[in-house]
Image (cartoon, rainbow, N blue to C red):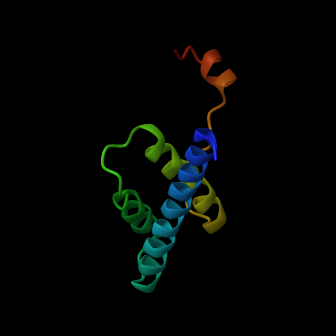
Amino acid sequence: MTKASRQQGAQEARTRMAYKIMQQVYERGQAEGQSIDQIHLAIRAAYPWGERRAWPYKAWLLARREFYERHGLPLRPRASIAESVQEGGA
């Protein structure tokens, strides 16, 4: 097994773990009758890996995009690079 394949496996495992955490928070929120906004805040607060940076945070964001789309939770649309350049972004 190469270093790259081990790293990819670890990244995929972290993404799956993030999705499972979101699923648990979502199910608990629904059972408690929480609003979509409350569930969103609870998912946000459930981030388990300390500082939001590097690969752990990227895994969280990948899982969150898929989870939110699948469950109809509000998610800002992705900004395209072309749009940000046209708007004068860095």
Quick check: 67 left or right of 42?
A: right
Instruction: Identify the residue at the far left of this view.
Output: 50
Front in this rendered view, residue 52 or 3: 3
Residue at 35% of width from left, 58% of height from top? Answer: 48
| Labels in figure, total | 0
Q: In this rendering, would 57 be left or right of 77?
A: left
Residue 2: x %, y % from top left: 63, 42
Is residue 75 something one can see in this rendering? no
Above or below: residue 76 compared with residue 81: below
Question: In the rendered view, would you say 42 is above or below 75?
Answer: below
Seen at 62% across and 16% down, the residue is 85
Q: Nearer the viewer, residue 53 or 67?
A: 53
Q: Residue at x 42, y 77 (%)?
A: 29
Based on the displayed image, in which of its 4 quarters is residue 7 positioned?
Answer: top right
In the image shown, does 36 or 23 lie closer to the viewer?
A: 23
What is the x, y in percent for residue 76?
A: 56, 46
Residue 87 visible somewhere in the drawing: yes
Work out which residue is located at the far front of the displayed protein and give it. Answer: 1
Note whether 12 is above or below 54 in the view shown: below
Q: Position of residue 22 (x, y in %)?
A: 48, 66
Q: Picture quarter containing residue 21? A: bottom left
Q: Is residue 19 left or right of residue 48?
A: right
Q: Which residue is located at x 51 percent, y 72 percent?
A: 23
In the image, residue 42 sits, relative to residue 12, either above or below, namely: below
